[in-house]
Amino acid sequence: MYQRSAYYRASKMPRMPVPLGARSVGHYVVEAGYAERPIQKWFVQVFWGIRGRGQIVIDGEPCMVGPDQIAAYFPGDWHRVSSAEDWEYRWWTLDGPHATEVARSFGLSGPWPCEAGACPQELFAQLEQEIRDEAPFTEFRASATAYRLLTLAAGRKAGAAAPAVTSETLADRCVALIRKRYADPALCVDFLARALAVHRSRLSREFRRRFGVPPVAYIHSLRLQRGFSMLRETDATVTDIARQVGFVDPAYFSRCVSHTTGMCPRDLRSASRKG
């Protein structure tokens, strides 16, 4: 008998603007011969083994995940999960504009599997409850719990090798430049490519490989996140906020806020302060 439980953020509820969101969480107990249909997905998914061993395929290479071990998929990866023996594991998924960046900054970049210690089952149970809860702003609590799980997953058992320190990549330099210049309405991929002295196609390719989204999507998400923060924390007008975070057209900024959160800027500001 397969025993599987999974909880997903209700799509009918407005998504709160968090840079790192807990999208879903699950607890699977599967028998030998279990196999999922391969599918390409666009979020971060972390597996944490409890007992037995199962296989996930990453970049064409099989990875066996056993007790106290973790492995992860990133946006754009093809998910291929199977097991030749009984296997119990938990998993959770992350989305948001900074999900890939934050996960990799914790050292979750392989080689897989990584030793992570005993699976924190109580914390997974807490995340399940928070994802199922439809109360206002519960997504912020779920995001904090997902961050705690990342912190524990990044910790290695005594004696395990620490993740290697790598030099700054082209994508990292691009992010640093975006964070510095995001408020400039002229910021675009061509500007970034010229500033970094590379062809725009190479920059876009390496950026997407590193962070899971193209540079233009990252810029847009960062501007929105800064806008959300200003709506919550200041009394500036929507027009002023839009221009300060790089939107030429305040009406377009308002439409983006509504599309992302399900609320207009005024209602988002009011709801944030009531929460």
Image: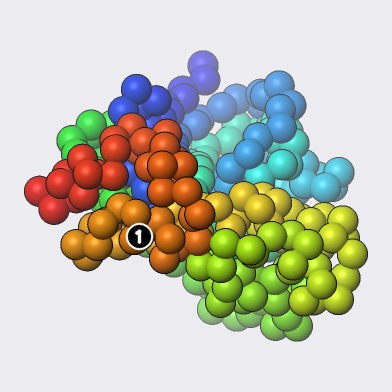
Place of residue 156 in the rendered image (x, y in percent of width and height, measured from the top left):
54, 72
Amino acid marked by disc 1: Ile
> Hey, which quadrant is residue 38 in on the image?
top right
- Residue displayed at 74% across by 60% down: 189
Q: Is residue 123 left or right of residue 102?
A: left
In front here: 122 or 16? 16
Q: Is residue 129 above or below residue 123?
A: above
Place of residue 19 in the rendered image (x, y in percent of width and height, measured from the top left):
44, 55
- Residue displayed at 71% across by 27% down: 39
Place of residue 232 in the rendered image (x, y in percent of width and height, measured from the top left):
23, 58
> Hey, which quadrant is residue 251 in on the image?
top left
The local secondary structure at tag 1 comes to helix
User: Colour scheme of this structure image?
Assistant: rainbow
Q: Is residue 240 above or below residue 251?
A: below
Residue designated by label 1: 241
Q: Is residue 135 left or right of residue 14?
A: left
